[in-house]
Image (cartoon, rainbow, N blue to C red):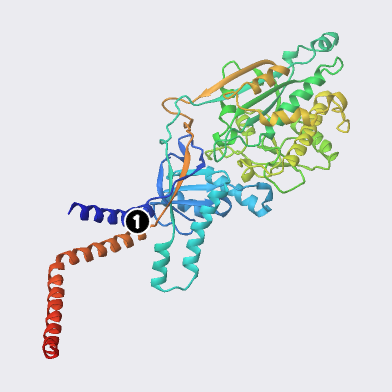
Amino acid sequence: MLRETDGGMSYFLLIAIPVLAFCLPVMASEFEVKSMSKFDVNGQNFGSRQSLISLEARSLYSWNTSRHCVLTRLINLSVNDFDKIRQNAGGLIIMLPSDIMKLDVEAKEHIAVLEQAMLTHSGAVPIYFAPYNINLEKIIDEITYTTIKASSQNQTSVAQLIMSVSANGYHATVGGTNKVANKNSKIPIIYGELLSNQLHLKANDNAVDAHKLPVILITATLKTFGVFNDYPVNADVTVLLALIEMFSKLHSTTNMAPNYRLIFLISDTGLLLNFQGSKKWLEIDDNSALQNVEFVLCLDTIIESLSSNPDMDMYMHVSKPPKEKTSISHFFKLLKSTAEKYNITVEGVHKKINLADSKLAWEHERFSIKRYPSFTLSSLKSHRSPSRTTIFKDDETRILTHTLIASRIVAEALASFMYKMEPTTSIFDGQFAIKEENVLPYFGIKSVLHNNDLKDAFEKYLNNVKIIYDKADSRDPDFMFYNENDVKLNVYRVKPAIFDIFLTILIGFYLLTVFFGIQYFPLFYDKVSRLTRDDTSVQTNGHYPERLKFK
């Protein structure tokens, strides 16, 4: 009896183990992902506060419930799709393109518009970005192909059921904890002054005290994140640092003492935080730099990082059209004349400040509100251009070339204004020229919260370098950042839910068959035995007389 039981158990395991192995999920594929940026500005929430995902992975075309996590490519996702997913799906994982440069103009514009939409809304679901990975692409292709195949073919209900049962599904999982507000959120602001050569000022009888000279303030914002936590191209800061280096060389000569003081200011983030750094700098008590300001020059997207246009344009944005014979009007004419040497047009754009808007359009509006003459130089004609918030870049050679040209144009126009020179004069040649090897390191500049590169660059050329911080208020913060954790995406190959139903029915039918087999086996055995005995009896009775007769 024991031997028969062992044999039955062996047969049971022989059948059960392959079935269980077939039903269990395959070992997970692990992928790097970056969480969508999360921040608050003036009480408004941006990004997603959720982090955990453990849902069935579906394509962009097959999801329909909050129990689904959508896997898709960035180039396939539209703004309308994003709005629906962020409100109704359970999660969103977006795979980035393998090479931005290979995309056409329409695709690049689409990506920039989508980024802008993501950064102006909050999401109720976890949103992650995955760098391009060929294995992840295969998974997206598979779930997309299955959906398209099922919807494109005119199949019977039975055929569709068989396809649904035999198809493979995927389960997406992202661990970690939900993002928590960083109560120590702060924005660094660094500034310093480029002093003239004091020896030349003392030798000049008509020279005045350098601290009494009019001030030209040059500002830029250091972009520290976009749709996810990574540094975009910071051409504005690169141009500002190039200007510092160029004018430092110029001021070091004994015959080039200007009639103006140059102050340079860099704050973090900028547009996404409504130029909070500039606002803080204007509010500091001991700020006497702007008491005798000539004008404020702001740099904002001086170079487009994601553009297929090989040409370069420049626009001067003002809140109020400058009057004739004012400093800004004079500088605008010098800028146009200087740019013509490089076959670049400069156009003025006037936009009034709308105080009803929750966010300012340009950084110079922070200074214009305080009645300081100010303007913004940009390669964009409209403040609504999605290129301002993109984190992507395409042609690094084009970006570098345009950055060098922009640096020369702004530097020569400033020099013409400060030294009363003709704009046709090429002062920044030879030892004063800015070269590629001087500019390239500036593209990798990080925030002072991360390293001292920016501080070292300021202290190398400037005097009176100071760093202040705008810290978020504990009760009513103007801005807030959220802690980020490194997480992984795990994708398991599993059977769809309908397969579980089908398998349950199959197992139930099998168990029912076994049950009835065991229940009625004695009756079946009796009938078979009776039939066997009757047949044997008939055969015996039929042959017995013949045997006797033979004898």
Query: Against 39, is 520 above or below?
Result: below
> Looking at numbered disc 1 in the image, what kind of residue is underneath it?
Val
- The residue sitting at 47% across, 24% down in the picture is 184
Taking the image as shown, residue 183 lies to the left or right of residue 243, namely left
The quadrant the N terminus occupies is bottom left
Mark 1 lies on residue: 19
Q: Quadrant of residue 159?
A: bottom left
* Position in image of residue 475 (x %, y %): 41, 26
Residue 324 seen anywhere in this rendered image of the structure: no
- The residue sitting at 54% across, 44% down in the picture is 130
Q: Nearer the viewer, residue 59 or 517?
A: 517
Query: Against 97, is 267 above or below?
Result: above
Query: Against 239, is 537 above or below?
Result: below
Taking the image as shown, residue 77 lies to the left or right of residue 55, namely right
Classed neighbour count for the residue bearing mark 1: other residues with Cα under 10 Å, few (<14), some (14–19), many (≥20):
few
* Position in image of residue 217 (x %, y %): 69, 25
* Position in image of residue 57 (x %, y %): 44, 52
Residue 405 seen anywhere in this rendered image of the structure: yes
